[in-house]
Structure formats: structure tokens, C-alpha cells
Amino acid sequence: MIFLNIITSSQNYLVKKLKTLATNKGRKRFGEFIVEGNKFALNIPKEWESVNTVFSESYAISNEAQIKKTGNPVILKDHIFSSVSGTVTPAGVLAVVKIRGFEFSDILSCPKKFIIIACNLQDPGNMGTLIRTANAAGASGVLVSNDSVDIWSPKVVRATTGSIFNIPIVIGDIKSMMIGLKDRGISLIAADLNAKKTPYQADLRKPLALIIGNESQGLSADMVALSDTTLKLPMALGVESLNASVASGILMYEVLRQRIGANA
Amino acid sequence: MIFLNIITSSQNYLVKKLKTLATNKGRKRFGEFIVEGNKFALNIPKEWESVNTVFSESYAISNEAQIKKTGNPVILKDHIFSSVSGTVTPAGVLAVVKIRGFEFSDILSCPKKFIIIACNLQDPGNMGTLIRTANAAGASGVLVSNDSVDIWSPKVVRATTGSIFNIPIVIGDIKSMMIGLKDRGISLIAADLNAKKTPYQADLRKPLALIIGNESQGLSADMVALSDTTLKLPMALGVESLNASVASGILMYEVLRQRIGANA
């Protein structure tokens, strides 16, 4: 099969747009983001709108059947594909997907009332991993503070390994969301290195939101003041802290453990 | 203060050596590794031998007192320092440290008998974070398979945030070490996505080694066969796996939780 419409110019509109989507500003402008890799890019859940599926020429040549099944495949010369890919060794497939805006109420309506709050998280790997773990641990949703790393950035999306599609995420003013949760009887539980109590001493079966702070500064004093409980994982002497995504994962699974009961 | 001996040439022996230490081969040849950042590079524990403390010129100018306290400070022109640094925005301080070889017996002699086995782990961030969490959770030591990422690489060292100095780590043939542990009555507990049991259904208070496999392939069949028990964390429908360092962190803290008792 010969592909007649291979894009060969870096001046092509779509190529320029793909480059723009690598930036926060560009994603805001178009309301779209990029998902890379055949596993995720070719399996966008139907609740999400895939705008384009883009292939590298060499991927297209060796996966003809797949290309035919794709609605409106776009094929780029390999070096053009590389120039828009966020990875060192591009898989040769990416999808442009419409950003789906969830509302605070979408998360509140979930019966489980197990919410994760990411407050000023800056590392894309940590943010993506937190979203992946929240999904795995069965959380109702993730609230992300305005000053956190953009969750639609390629590095965050990659680290979620598909979970970005499977759990509602709301970005917004975290303080007002926290007050909203409190008003609805949801306990605010903050991970805080100054806490006296361990998660093993707390009842985590009640409706709650787990608040995770910045990688190096932790949570600000007013966030801690707004919380109902602060918790700290026990740590060996001389160890100051855990990685943010690991600490949040341990806390999320302690919630899950307490809820499924000791024998599950 | 004027620094008389600033290294200005990239052809300088030490500069060449620092570049070599960024490679696995170079670290093997010299038996040394690099620790970056003032927090860790200036606080090498006394059980470890610091060979050189290296500063960038601009760091040295603004931290004179610190330089005077350092035994044999080496100062590099800023662009030379950048060329040997593994970070995009170098802190301006690094230490060259002798690799300390631990023996399998060092780990066995620890009374707690809580050992972590990293088997074919490839991502430096995961490996470093695993070491950091093992240290925090009070593990006796970490056994690392020969085919894993080199633990002395700058990215691993950075991700341990100092824990590389605080927990014994042995690199070697993992199968023979596993057999050695079994012979000494230490249970081999493998994290395995095919397992039927959750960690919450297992007694983790007994002497044990927790085995963590490769990020995408998990553990090989013969590793699983050699294990006494396999465990899998419960996960929401549609989620295939957790990040390796998060999964291992959750398991380590479940061991800790069971050992300190429910009320600790």
C-alpha cells in the first residue's frame, strides 16, 4: 500500500499544532492533548473524543491493517513524527484527544467518597503516578490545585498509563474545593511531616479526602489548618521523607485496606 | 577570596574522570560514584570515603566559608562543572565517593529479617525510590540482581535522596541469593500480578524477603516458582498494574504495619 497523503513539511498546520500541544498554553488554546503509544492512542475510551490519530510513516508501512481501521489516519514522515513526539524513541503512534472537563459535582456524586487532592505537586512523574494509583485504589476522583503541574502534559499523561481516562479529575481553586468538601461532611486528611498520628491509628473508612502536598515544601500552613486530621507515615531514623507518589500510594492503599476489611 | 587553582580545561584529568564516572564502565573502573547537590555531597557519612569535593566557580565565590572547611576542594569553571553534572540546573557541588561493597552476610546479620529484592528493575527513578522507601520502612537491606540498572548511576543516587548511604545494598546473582535466604528460613514473598492472595491476607511478621520484578514484564516464571508466596495488591477494574516503586512501597509499609501492630 502506498500512502498518498504523507505530511512531509514541518510547516504543515497539523505539525505546528502538534508542537503547540506540547505546551500548556497550546493545550489551553485548543482544549486538546496528546496521548502517545499504540496501547493508549489506539484505545481511547468512547467517552473521550479522539480528534486525530497520527502515525509515523514506518509504523504505517508495517501496520497497514491497523491504519485502514483508523477513521482519519494522519501519516507523518518519520523525522517529522520524531519532532512532535515527547519520547526519545517514539512508538510511531499518537492521538490528539479533546480535554474532558469534569465538575466538582461529578466527584461528589460518587458514592465511595474517597477523594485525592494534589496540592501544588510539581513533578509530572509524581502527578501521573498519583493519578494511576488513585484509579487503582478505587478513589472517586482527583482534585488538582491550579498551581500544580498541568495534568494534560505528555509526561503526566504517560505516567498515568491510561488512568487519565478512567478517573474524574478537576483542576481548580483547592481552598474553595476543600471548604466545599468539609461542608458536605467529608473529612480532610492531610499528609504532613509534622503530624503526630500514623494512618494506622486513624479511622479511614469514613468519607474522606486525602491531601498530598508539594514534593519539597509539603503542605502550606493554611492547608494544614483547614484539615481535620494530619497523618505521617512512620519512618526509620535519619529518613526525612518519602517520594510524594509513594507516600500517597501507601496512604491510598491504607484507606482501601481499612475499607475492604482485614480479611479481604 | 581569589581561587588560585580553578580548573579551566575540559582536558584536565579530573574533569575527564568525572565524565567517565557518569558511565557504568567508568564507575566499575574507578570503584567510585558521584553524589550531587550540597545537601548530600557535603554530608557524606563517615563510614563512606569521599575522594573529592567539587564546586563550580560561582558556587565557590558565594560560599567561601564552606569551601574553606572542605578538605581538598576542587573548583571548576561553571561551564566545565555543567559539562560533568547530570542535572540541567547544577547545584554547583558534587562529591566523588568510593563505592562501598556490602556482603550478603551483612544483610543476613540484621536482626529484623526484612529484605527487599529488586529483580531486573530498569528505571533509575524506580530503583532509587525503592531504595529510599526500603530505608524509610526499616528494611535490613536490598539485594539487587545483576541485570538491574546500576545503583551507582547519578539518577539512581539522586532518587535515593541520601538513602544510598543508609541501607546495605548487595548486587549479585539473585537466584543463588534467594536460595541462600530460603536455606536460612527466610520466606520469599513475590509481588506477582497473577497472585490470588492480597498482602492483607498474608502474615508478614515472619522473617521475609519481598521480591519486586521488572516494570513491564514482572518476575520471570522461575523466580515465581522459587518463591514461597505470591501476592497481588487489589486494583480497580481496568487497571493493569501499579508503578513498580509505588507497589513495592505499599508492600513494604504493609510489612511495617503488621510488625508494629495495629495501634502503633
Image (tube, coloured by chain):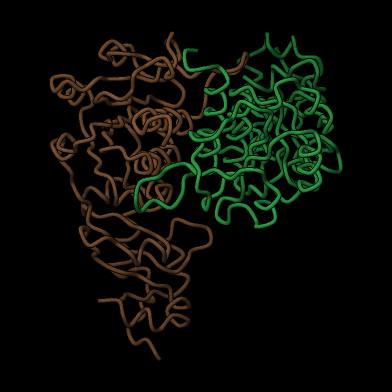
Chain colours: A brown, B green
Residue B115: % across, % down: 69, 32
* Residue in the foreground of this view, choosing between B69 and A41: A41
Residue B235: % across, % down: 40, 45
Residue A251: % across, % down: 41, 27
Q: Which residue is painted at 40% across and 68% down in the image?
A: A93
- Among the 4 quarters of the image, the one containing residue A197: top left
Q: Is residue B155 in view?
A: no
* Residue in the foreground of this view, choosing between A125 and B130: B130
Q: Which residue is painted at 23% across and 65% down in the image?
A: A51
User: Can you say whether B144 is above or below A8 in the image?
Assistant: above
User: Which quarter shows the N terminus of chain A?
Assistant: bottom left
Left-right relation of A82 to B147: left
Left-right relation of B242 to B11: left
User: Which quarter shows the C terminus of chain A?
Assistant: top left
- Among the 4 quarters of the image, the one containing residue A19: bottom left
Quick one: which residue is furthest to the bottom in this view?
A: A1
Residue B172: % across, % down: 80, 43
Q: Which residue is painted at 41% across and 66% down in the image?
A: A38
Left-right relation of B194 to A259: right
Left-right relation of A138 to A38: left
- Among the 4 quarters of the image, the one containing residue B70: top right
